[in-house]
Amino acid sequence: MLRKVTAGLIMMFGLGLIAIPVWGLDFKPGLYEITSKVEMPGMPAGAIPAQTITQCMTEQDPVPSKNAGGEECKVTDMKQSGNSMTWKMKCDQQEDMISEGKMTYNGDSFSGTITTMMGPKAGNMTIVTRISGKRIGDCK
């Protein structure tokens, strides 16, 4: 069960979340190398290796937009303040999972944190995913 949840979180947060218009963000479109690192309570540091992907990110889609395979997720309460975006997301899987995220852009890089609260079937865990990305070139 824990491996399934961890794999789902890496897919959801490492490979993406949502599409956000880039109104006023300090963001340079292009090919990005995106790394995500999941931290779970009770797991030793480094137990879950970081995941790295590359993806073309555009002005219309500055956050990777692939959703977790088979998960029904709904993004709510999306806000922009300066170079940062915040959002809340609820996913229905074996039970509800609620996440809050913040991404901050700095020209050709970004970083962010997603905090996910799991219910009783998953041990009432809080999981933190740290995401960073850097532009490595133009989209192909």
Image (cartoon, rainbow, N blue to C red):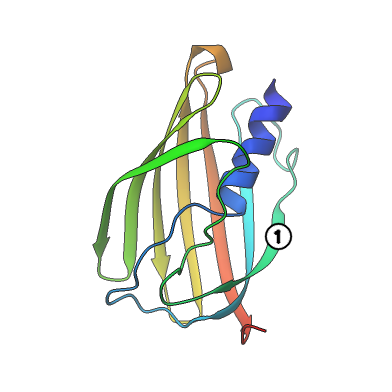
From the top left corner, tell me how far across and down residue 101 is, in percent.
40, 48
From the top left corner, tell me how far across and down residue 65 is, in percent.
52, 58
Q: How many marks?
A: 1
Q: Which residue is at 33% across, 53% downward?
A: 86
The quarter of the picture where the C terminus appears is: bottom right
Residue 98 vertical placement versus 18 (above, below)? above
Residue at disc 1, secondary structure = strand
Left/right placement of residue 76 relative to residue 90 reads: left
Left/right placement of residue 32 relative to residue 46 reads: left
From the top left corner, tell me how far across and down residue 47 is, in percent.
75, 38
Along the line of sight, the residue nearer the viewer: 109 or 19: 19
The quarter of the picture where the N terminus appears is: top right
Left/right placement of residue 7 relative to residue 116 reads: right
Along the line of sight, the residue nearer the viewer: 32 or 104: 32
Q: Which residue is at 55% across, 45% downward?
A: 129
Pick out the residue farthest to the top: 120
In which quadrant of the rendered view does residue 5 lie? top right
Residue type at the position of mark 1? Thr
Residue 69 vertical placement versus 23 (above, below)? above
Pointer 1 residue: 52
Pick out the residue farthest to the bottom: 138
